[in-house]
Image: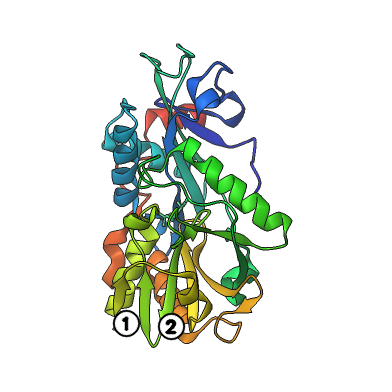
Amino acid sequence: MSFDESKWVWMDGQVIPWANATTHVSAHALHYGSGVFEGMRCYETSDGPAVFRLDAHLDRLYASAEIYGIAIPYTREELTRGVNQIVRINNFRSCYVRPICYLGSGSLGVHPGNNPVQVVILAWPWAPYLGAEGLKDGVRVTVSPWRKFQSRMMPTTAKACGQYLNSMLAVRDAVSRGFAEALLLDSDGHLAEGSGENLFIVRDGRLLTNDERHSILLGITREAVVRIASDLGYPVEIRALELEDLLSADEAFFTGTAAEVTPIREVDGTAIGKRTPGSVTEDIQQVFFAATSGRDQRYKDWLHRIDSEDVEVSDPLLQTVS
Ligand SMILES: Cc1ncc(COP(=O)(O)O)c(C=O)c1O
Protein backbone atom coordinates (compact mmCIF):
# COMPACT_ATOMS: atom_id res chain seq x y z
CA MET A 1 0.00 0.00 0.00
CA SER A 2 1.27 3.49 -0.73
CA PHE A 3 -0.15 6.82 0.33
CA ASP A 4 0.10 9.53 -2.24
CA GLU A 5 0.53 12.95 -0.66
CA SER A 6 -0.89 14.65 -3.73
CA LYS A 7 -4.31 13.14 -3.07
CA TRP A 8 -7.36 14.63 -1.38
CA VAL A 9 -9.26 13.66 1.74
CA TRP A 10 -12.87 14.34 2.78
CA MET A 11 -12.74 15.67 6.32
CA ASP A 12 -15.68 17.04 8.28
CA GLY A 13 -17.59 17.93 5.14
CA GLN A 14 -14.72 19.43 3.13
CA VAL A 15 -12.36 18.06 0.53
CA ILE A 16 -8.86 19.04 1.63
CA PRO A 17 -5.27 18.10 0.67
CA TRP A 18 -3.96 14.85 2.16
CA ALA A 19 -1.30 16.66 4.21
CA ASN A 20 -3.87 18.93 5.89
CA ALA A 21 -6.07 16.08 7.09
CA THR A 22 -4.74 16.06 10.68
CA THR A 23 -6.13 15.60 14.18
CA HIS A 24 -4.87 16.91 17.50
CA VAL A 25 -2.96 14.50 19.79
CA SER A 26 -5.55 15.06 22.52
CA ALA A 27 -8.26 13.36 20.43
CA HIS A 28 -10.18 10.85 22.57
CA ALA A 29 -9.94 8.24 19.79
CA LEU A 30 -6.15 8.29 19.85
CA HIS A 31 -6.11 7.46 23.56
CA TYR A 32 -9.01 5.02 23.80
CA GLY A 33 -9.75 3.79 20.26
CA SER A 34 -13.16 5.46 20.32
CA GLY A 35 -14.03 5.42 16.66
CA VAL A 36 -15.91 3.32 14.14
CA PHE A 37 -14.99 2.75 10.54
CA GLU A 38 -15.71 0.92 7.32
CA GLY A 39 -13.63 -0.52 4.54
CA MET A 40 -15.14 -0.70 1.08
CA ARG A 41 -13.69 -1.42 -2.31
CA CYS A 42 -14.37 0.62 -5.39
CA TYR A 43 -13.92 -1.49 -8.53
CA GLU A 44 -13.29 -0.60 -12.12
CA THR A 45 -16.30 -1.42 -14.29
CA SER A 46 -17.22 -0.66 -17.90
CA ASP A 47 -19.42 2.15 -16.49
CA GLY A 48 -16.57 3.70 -14.51
CA PRO A 49 -15.61 3.16 -10.86
CA ALA A 50 -18.27 1.60 -8.64
CA VAL A 51 -18.31 0.96 -4.88
CA PHE A 52 -19.27 -2.59 -3.98
CA ARG A 53 -22.15 -2.70 -1.46
CA LEU A 54 -21.96 0.92 -0.38
CA ASP A 55 -25.42 0.73 1.23
CA ALA A 56 -24.54 -2.26 3.38
CA HIS A 57 -21.30 -0.59 4.50
CA LEU A 58 -23.13 2.61 5.44
CA ASP A 59 -25.74 0.58 7.33
CA ARG A 60 -22.98 -1.07 9.34
CA LEU A 61 -21.15 2.23 9.92
CA TYR A 62 -24.25 3.85 11.45
CA ALA A 63 -25.02 0.68 13.43
CA SER A 64 -21.46 0.54 14.83
CA ALA A 65 -21.64 4.23 15.72
CA GLU A 66 -24.96 3.80 17.47
CA ILE A 67 -23.64 1.00 19.66
CA TYR A 68 -20.78 3.23 20.81
CA GLY A 69 -22.94 6.35 21.21
CA ILE A 70 -21.08 8.16 18.44
CA ALA A 71 -23.59 10.48 16.78
CA ILE A 72 -22.44 10.86 13.17
CA PRO A 73 -23.20 14.47 12.25
CA TYR A 74 -23.78 13.70 8.56
CA THR A 75 -26.61 12.01 6.72
CA ARG A 76 -26.19 8.94 4.55
CA GLU A 77 -26.65 11.17 1.53
CA GLU A 78 -23.83 13.45 2.68
CA LEU A 79 -21.47 10.52 3.28
CA THR A 80 -22.43 8.98 -0.07
CA ARG A 81 -21.62 12.27 -1.72
CA GLY A 82 -18.32 12.38 0.20
CA VAL A 83 -17.41 8.91 -1.12
CA ASN A 84 -18.29 9.98 -4.67
CA GLN A 85 -16.25 13.15 -4.36
CA ILE A 86 -13.18 11.50 -2.96
CA VAL A 87 -13.04 8.78 -5.60
CA ARG A 88 -13.65 11.23 -8.40
CA ILE A 89 -11.36 14.01 -7.33
CA ASN A 90 -8.48 11.60 -6.82
CA ASN A 91 -9.11 10.11 -10.26
CA PHE A 92 -9.17 6.57 -8.95
CA ARG A 93 -10.43 3.90 -11.32
CA SER A 94 -10.38 1.46 -8.42
CA CYS A 95 -9.44 1.93 -4.78
CA TYR A 96 -10.18 1.09 -1.17
CA VAL A 97 -12.42 3.58 0.65
CA ARG A 98 -12.15 4.10 4.41
CA PRO A 99 -14.75 6.26 6.16
CA ILE A 100 -13.93 6.73 9.85
CA CYS A 101 -15.94 8.53 12.56
CA TYR A 102 -14.15 9.20 15.83
CA LEU A 103 -14.24 11.23 18.99
CA GLY A 104 -12.06 14.31 18.81
CA SER A 105 -10.60 16.60 21.47
CA GLY A 106 -12.38 17.67 24.60
CA SER A 107 -12.50 15.48 27.67
CA LEU A 108 -9.74 12.94 28.14
CA GLY A 109 -11.75 11.08 30.74
CA VAL A 110 -12.67 7.62 29.56
CA HIS A 111 -16.25 8.91 29.54
CA PRO A 112 -16.06 11.12 26.49
CA GLY A 113 -18.57 13.75 27.58
CA ASN A 114 -19.44 15.94 24.63
CA ASN A 115 -16.31 15.52 22.55
CA PRO A 116 -16.97 16.37 18.91
CA VAL A 117 -17.38 13.57 16.38
CA GLN A 118 -15.02 13.92 13.45
CA VAL A 119 -15.65 12.21 10.15
CA VAL A 120 -13.06 11.46 7.49
CA ILE A 121 -13.18 9.58 4.21
CA LEU A 122 -9.85 8.36 2.88
CA ALA A 123 -9.24 6.43 -0.31
CA TRP A 124 -6.14 4.78 -1.68
CA PRO A 125 -5.25 2.06 -4.19
CA TRP A 126 -4.97 -1.26 -2.37
CA ALA A 127 -3.67 -4.47 -3.91
CA PRO A 128 -5.12 -7.82 -2.76
CA TYR A 129 -4.77 -7.76 1.05
CA LEU A 130 -3.24 -11.21 1.37
CA GLY A 131 -1.17 -10.77 -1.80
CA ALA A 132 -1.96 -11.43 -5.48
CA GLU A 133 -0.30 -14.82 -5.13
CA GLY A 134 -2.42 -15.61 -2.05
CA LEU A 135 -5.58 -14.71 -3.93
CA LYS A 136 -4.64 -17.07 -6.73
CA ASP A 137 -2.85 -19.96 -5.00
CA GLY A 138 -4.14 -19.72 -1.43
CA VAL A 139 -2.54 -18.65 1.86
CA ARG A 140 -0.91 -20.40 4.79
CA VAL A 141 -2.55 -19.57 8.10
CA THR A 142 -1.98 -20.36 11.75
CA VAL A 143 -4.33 -20.73 14.69
CA SER A 144 -3.63 -17.74 16.90
CA PRO A 145 -2.70 -18.02 20.57
CA TRP A 146 -4.95 -14.94 20.98
CA ARG A 147 -8.68 -15.65 21.30
CA LYS A 148 -11.32 -13.46 19.65
CA PHE A 149 -13.01 -11.33 22.32
CA GLN A 150 -16.49 -12.39 23.24
CA SER A 151 -19.55 -10.29 22.38
CA ARG A 152 -20.34 -9.59 26.02
CA MET A 153 -16.90 -8.00 26.34
CA MET A 154 -17.20 -5.86 23.21
CA PRO A 155 -19.82 -5.82 20.48
CA THR A 156 -18.23 -8.07 17.89
CA THR A 157 -20.73 -7.07 15.20
CA ALA A 158 -19.50 -3.45 15.41
CA LYS A 159 -16.47 -2.35 13.43
CA ALA A 160 -14.76 -0.17 15.99
CA CYS A 161 -11.18 1.10 16.09
CA GLY A 162 -10.12 -0.15 19.53
CA GLN A 163 -11.45 -3.61 18.82
CA TYR A 164 -8.72 -4.06 16.23
CA LEU A 165 -5.98 -4.34 18.86
CA ASN A 166 -7.11 -7.95 19.20
CA SER A 167 -6.67 -8.46 15.44
CA MET A 168 -3.33 -6.65 15.45
CA LEU A 169 -1.90 -8.91 18.14
CA ALA A 170 -3.04 -11.98 16.25
CA VAL A 171 -1.77 -10.99 12.80
CA ARG A 172 1.58 -9.74 14.11
CA ASP A 173 2.14 -13.05 15.84
CA ALA A 174 1.14 -14.97 12.68
CA VAL A 175 3.37 -12.96 10.36
CA SER A 176 6.31 -13.16 12.78
CA ARG A 177 6.01 -16.95 12.54
CA GLY A 178 5.94 -16.89 8.72
CA PHE A 179 2.18 -17.16 8.09
CA ALA A 180 0.03 -14.89 5.95
CA GLU A 181 -2.85 -14.60 8.42
CA ALA A 182 -4.08 -15.61 11.86
CA LEU A 183 -7.20 -17.59 12.56
CA LEU A 184 -8.75 -16.81 15.93
CA LEU A 185 -10.78 -19.21 18.04
CA ASP A 186 -13.66 -17.81 20.10
CA SER A 187 -13.65 -17.93 23.89
CA ASP A 188 -15.26 -21.42 23.81
CA GLY A 189 -12.63 -22.82 21.43
CA HIS A 190 -14.78 -22.82 18.27
CA LEU A 191 -13.39 -21.21 15.13
CA ALA A 192 -14.21 -17.52 14.95
CA GLU A 193 -12.52 -15.73 12.04
CA GLY A 194 -9.33 -14.30 10.60
CA SER A 195 -7.86 -11.07 11.95
CA GLY A 196 -9.69 -9.26 9.12
CA GLU A 197 -11.76 -11.90 7.34
CA ASN A 198 -14.62 -14.35 7.78
CA LEU A 199 -14.13 -18.07 7.25
CA PHE A 200 -15.83 -20.57 4.95
CA ILE A 201 -15.24 -24.32 4.83
CA VAL A 202 -16.24 -26.54 1.91
CA ARG A 203 -17.11 -30.15 2.55
CA ASP A 204 -18.88 -32.58 0.18
CA GLY A 205 -20.03 -29.71 -2.04
CA ARG A 206 -21.59 -27.77 0.88
CA LEU A 207 -20.41 -24.50 2.38
CA LEU A 208 -20.15 -24.12 6.12
CA THR A 209 -19.74 -20.82 7.91
CA ASN A 210 -20.42 -19.48 11.39
CA ASP A 211 -22.24 -16.38 12.59
CA GLU A 212 -22.35 -13.76 15.35
CA ARG A 213 -22.81 -16.44 18.02
CA HIS A 214 -19.12 -17.13 17.45
CA SER A 215 -17.94 -13.56 17.99
CA ILE A 216 -17.41 -12.66 14.34
CA LEU A 217 -17.88 -9.41 12.52
CA LEU A 218 -20.80 -10.11 10.20
CA GLY A 219 -18.96 -9.49 6.97
CA ILE A 220 -20.61 -7.91 3.98
CA THR A 221 -18.50 -10.09 1.68
CA ARG A 222 -19.60 -13.11 3.71
CA GLU A 223 -23.23 -12.21 3.05
CA ALA A 224 -22.51 -11.71 -0.67
CA VAL A 225 -20.77 -15.09 -0.82
CA VAL A 226 -23.71 -16.83 0.87
CA ARG A 227 -25.97 -15.41 -1.84
CA ILE A 228 -23.54 -16.32 -4.66
CA ALA A 229 -23.15 -19.87 -3.32
CA SER A 230 -26.93 -20.32 -3.19
CA ASP A 231 -27.24 -18.96 -6.75
CA LEU A 232 -24.61 -21.49 -7.84
CA GLY A 233 -26.59 -24.26 -6.18
CA TYR A 234 -24.22 -24.93 -3.28
CA PRO A 235 -26.05 -25.50 0.01
CA VAL A 236 -24.83 -23.21 2.82
CA GLU A 237 -24.98 -24.32 6.44
CA ILE A 238 -24.53 -21.75 9.21
CA ARG A 239 -23.27 -23.37 12.37
CA ALA A 240 -20.43 -23.60 14.86
CA LEU A 241 -17.14 -24.54 13.18
CA GLU A 242 -14.56 -26.68 14.93
CA LEU A 243 -10.87 -26.77 14.15
CA GLU A 244 -11.34 -30.42 13.10
CA ASP A 245 -13.90 -29.26 10.49
CA LEU A 246 -11.26 -27.04 8.98
CA LEU A 247 -8.38 -29.52 9.12
CA SER A 248 -10.49 -32.19 7.41
CA ALA A 249 -12.12 -29.79 4.92
CA ASP A 250 -12.08 -30.30 1.15
CA GLU A 251 -11.52 -26.57 0.73
CA ALA A 252 -11.53 -23.42 2.83
CA PHE A 253 -11.39 -19.71 2.11
CA PHE A 254 -11.48 -16.30 3.72
CA THR A 255 -13.86 -13.52 2.74
CA GLY A 256 -13.49 -9.81 3.39
CA THR A 257 -13.53 -6.49 1.61
CA ALA A 258 -9.75 -6.26 1.70
CA ALA A 259 -9.03 -10.00 1.23
CA GLU A 260 -11.96 -10.54 -1.21
CA VAL A 261 -12.23 -14.35 -1.63
CA THR A 262 -8.85 -15.81 -0.67
CA PRO A 263 -8.32 -19.58 -0.62
CA ILE A 264 -6.65 -21.17 2.42
CA ARG A 265 -4.18 -23.86 1.43
CA GLU A 266 -2.60 -24.78 4.74
CA VAL A 267 -3.34 -24.44 8.47
CA ASP A 268 -0.28 -24.80 10.71
CA GLY A 269 1.32 -27.12 8.17
CA THR A 270 -1.76 -29.26 7.54
CA ALA A 271 -2.83 -29.18 3.89
CA ILE A 272 -6.38 -28.13 3.11
CA GLY A 273 -7.58 -30.29 0.22
CA LYS A 274 -4.78 -30.63 -2.30
CA ARG A 275 -2.96 -27.49 -1.10
CA THR A 276 -4.39 -25.64 -4.10
CA PRO A 277 -7.68 -23.76 -4.42
CA GLY A 278 -10.57 -26.20 -4.92
CA SER A 279 -13.23 -26.02 -7.61
CA VAL A 280 -15.98 -24.65 -5.33
CA THR A 281 -13.72 -21.83 -4.12
CA GLU A 282 -12.78 -21.07 -7.71
CA ASP A 283 -16.43 -21.01 -8.82
CA ILE A 284 -17.29 -18.59 -6.05
CA GLN A 285 -14.25 -16.41 -6.70
CA GLN A 286 -15.17 -16.17 -10.36
CA VAL A 287 -18.74 -15.08 -9.73
CA PHE A 288 -17.61 -12.72 -6.97
CA PHE A 289 -15.25 -10.88 -9.34
CA ALA A 290 -17.88 -10.90 -12.08
CA ALA A 291 -20.19 -9.19 -9.58
CA THR A 292 -17.63 -6.63 -8.42
CA SER A 293 -16.67 -5.73 -11.98
CA GLY A 294 -20.29 -5.35 -13.09
CA ARG A 295 -20.04 -8.26 -15.56
CA ASP A 296 -22.80 -10.26 -13.85
CA GLN A 297 -26.11 -8.46 -14.13
CA ARG A 298 -27.66 -10.52 -11.33
CA TYR A 299 -25.69 -8.48 -8.83
CA LYS A 300 -25.83 -5.04 -10.40
CA ASP A 301 -27.70 -3.64 -7.38
CA TRP A 302 -24.57 -4.28 -5.33
CA LEU A 303 -22.65 -1.63 -7.25
CA HIS A 304 -22.86 2.09 -6.57
CA ARG A 305 -21.60 3.93 -9.63
CA ILE A 306 -19.37 6.87 -8.83
CA ASP A 307 -20.25 8.98 -11.81
CA SER A 308 -23.76 9.37 -10.47
CA GLU A 309 -25.39 12.70 -11.00
CA ASP A 310 -24.82 14.18 -7.55
CA VAL A 311 -21.16 14.76 -8.40
CA GLU A 312 -21.24 16.80 -11.56
CA VAL A 313 -18.05 18.48 -12.68
CA SER A 314 -19.92 21.70 -11.96
CA ASP A 315 -19.75 20.82 -8.25
CA PRO A 316 -18.31 24.04 -6.71
CA LEU A 317 -16.13 22.03 -4.33
CA LEU A 318 -14.53 20.09 -7.15
CA GLN A 319 -14.01 23.29 -9.09
CA THR A 320 -12.17 24.97 -6.25
CA VAL A 321 -9.69 22.15 -5.81
CA SER A 322 -9.20 20.82 -9.33
C1 LIG B 1 -12.46 -8.92 11.93
C2 LIG B 1 -13.08 -8.91 10.57
N1 LIG B 1 -13.88 -9.93 10.22
C3 LIG B 1 -14.46 -9.98 9.01
C4 LIG B 1 -14.26 -8.99 8.08
C5 LIG B 1 -14.93 -9.06 6.75
O1 LIG B 1 -15.94 -8.07 6.66
P1 LIG B 1 -16.36 -7.44 5.28
O2 LIG B 1 -16.64 -8.55 4.36
O3 LIG B 1 -17.57 -6.64 5.61
O4 LIG B 1 -15.24 -6.58 4.83
C6 LIG B 1 -13.43 -7.91 8.40
C7 LIG B 1 -13.18 -6.84 7.44
O5 LIG B 1 -13.81 -5.81 7.52
C8 LIG B 1 -12.84 -7.87 9.68
O6 LIG B 1 -12.02 -6.85 10.01
Q: Give the camera-side residue of 70 and 213.
A: 213
Whether residue 274 appears in this view of the structure is yes
Q: Are marks 2 and 1 in contact (CB under 8 Å)?
A: yes
Could you tell me residue 99's position as x and y percent? Answer: 43, 38
Q: Give the camera-side residue of 246 and 8.
A: 246
Could you tell me residue 210's position as x and y percent? Answer: 36, 64
Disc 2 is placed on an element classified as: helix
Amino acid on which the number 1 mark rests in the picture? Tyr
Amino acid on which the number 2 mark rests in the picture? Val
The residue at the point 61 percent across, 46 percent down is 169
Could you tell me residue 69's position as x and y percent? Answer: 31, 27
Does residue 262 sit above or below 231 in this rendering?
above
Q: Residues within 10 Å of mark 2 (few under 14, many from 20)?
A: many
Separation of residues labelled 2 and 1 (CA atoms): 8 Å
Q: Give the camera-side residue of 283 and 153.
A: 153
Does residue 48 sit above or below 268 in this rendering?
above
The residue at the point 44 percent across, 70 percent down is 242
Could you tell me residue 116's position as x and y percent? Answer: 39, 17
In the rendered image, the residue lying farthest to the top is 106
* Marked residue nearer the N-terminal end (2 or 1): 1
Which residue, given by chain and number where applicable, does mark 2 sit on? 280
Q: Give the camera-side residue of 106 and 169.
A: 169
Which residue, given by chain and number where applicable, does mark 1 sit on? 234
Q: Quadrant of residue 135?
A: bottom right
Q: Quadrant of residue 237?
A: bottom left
Disc 1 is placed on an element classified as: loop
